[in-house]
Image (spheres, coloured by chain):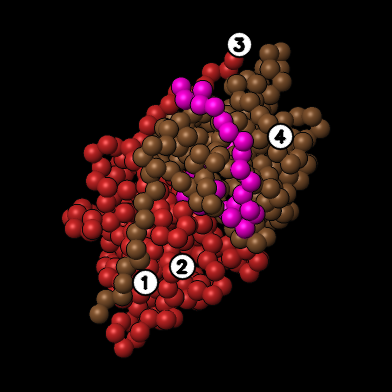
Chain colours: A red, B brown
Amino acid sequence: MHANIPSPKPLPVPLPKAYRLLNHGPTVLVTSTHNGVRNVMAAAWNMGLNYEPALVSVVIDKATLTRELIEASGKFALNVPARGIAAQTLAVGRSSGRDVDKAKHPDKFTAYGLNTFMGSDPDLPLVEGCVGWLECTLVPEPHNQERYDLFIGEVTAAWADPRVFANGHWAYNANTPVGLQTLHYVAGGTFLAVREAFEVAPAKTRP
Amino acid sequence: MHANIPSPKPLPVPLPKAYRLLNHGPTVLVTSTHNGVRNVMAAAWNMGLNYEPALVSVVIDKATLTRELIEASGKFALNVPARGIAAQTLAVGRSSGRDVDKAKHPDKFTAYGLNTFMGSDPDLPLVEGCVGWLECTLVPEPHNQERYDLFIGEVTAAWADPRVFANGHWAYNANTPVGLQTLHYVAGGTFLAVREAFEVAPAKTRP
């Protein structure tokens, strides 16, 4: 629907500001590769964890192929999808990389028409149609992974779409195309979309 | 600015659905009490962690009074503020409960004019002007708390504002008053606001 917006070159984001790509709570696409197998899944449960070193966290269920690839390769990327690929985001959140019909498609990327490009690491596919990307090295925490499905990554490179992120801030305004809005998952096939940013002054203390 | 919208009685949210109050990535207010000392702080880094038992996580810096109160009392509440209290949310995110002028105010709630009410637990103040509330018991994880400032809570009770949450889903639409939108923190004094929900059908696999 909105997928035909041409994409400019991603803008590098300084690592101590990388958390800002997740700060407002978007659903992400987690991408990973190991031994030539690639996968992509959706994850609403993600958050920043530290500024410097830049740490992020994401919940990845034990049943997923993504988890197997991350535990084997020790790395993953978080991609912040925009509304233009909402249908694909939903689809890769509902299907497993293990169930792809291999006679037709090598992986979920091609099965659902998600194109990828390369950032710093040739083994971390980044997804076109996203507006933020974080390449991460797994910080192994076996207890968290086993007990809570909680994975921690140190961000090694980050980028954003310069149409909606500038000077370390999301820059959504009333003229931002709908297809570039980040996705905030509710349930079922429903998302909330962010619109323009607004500023407030902090409340003063009462007399 | 939007604070005069009268609030209806909060609607109980079944615990396995409590994560949905955080699923779309709002900034929260963390409230806590110990030995008669109350506090409230803002936290953009929060996420759901499990359905049943209902677990949530939130990052709480070592310097905060909130952390001292949570570690002492073993509990906290997450309150999902709406735009009507954006200025207070920003203010309690920038100030410490330790720096309140005690000659004028007992705590940050009264200093910034945040009213509270009681849910299930008389020791967990819940904040008026929010649209979701989660009472939590701390799940002690000393390594996570020390190394990552990461706190995990088991949700023991949850509520939502029935004007914007119904049948286990956020129900934002074009007619929702601006003051009831959840807050998604960018940086500085800037937030993004969510608007209406939209539905998509999942992408089909390509031929």
Mark 4 element type: strand
Q: Earlier in the sequence, mark 3 or mark 2?
A: 2
Answer few, some or many: residues within 10 Å of disc 1's Cα (few below 14, many 20 plus, some between 14 and 19).
Answer: many
Residue type highlighted by circle 2: Lys
Q: Chain of mark 4?
A: B
Residue type highlighted by circle 3: Pro
Answer few, some or many: residues within 10 Å of disc 2's Cα (few below 14, many 20 plus, some between 14 and 19).
Answer: many
In this picture, residue A8 sits left or right of residue B40: left
Residue under circle 1?
A123
Q: Chain of mark 1?
A: A
Callout 2–callout 1 Cβ contact below 8 Å: yes
Mark 3 element type: loop
Q: Quick check: is B10 in the magenta stretch?
A: yes
Magenta-colored span: B1-29
Residue under circle 2?
A75
Residue under circle 4?
B118
Mark 2 element type: strand
Callout 1–callout 4 Cβ contact below 8 Å: no
| Residue under disc 1 on the same chain as residue under disc 4 | no
Closest to the camera, between mark 2 and mark 4, is: 4
Residue type highlighted by circle 4: Met
Magenta span: chief secondary structure:
loop
* x, y percent for residue B22: 54, 49
Closest to the camera, between mark 3 and mark 2, is: 3
Between the C-alphas of marks 2 and 4, the distance is 44 Å
Q: Earlier in the sequence, mark 3 or mark 1?
A: 1
Label number found at residue A207: 3
Q: Residue at x 56, y 30 (%)?
A: B7
From the viewer's perspective, is residue A162 above or below residue A84?
above
Q: Earlier in the sequence, mark 2 or mark 1?
A: 2
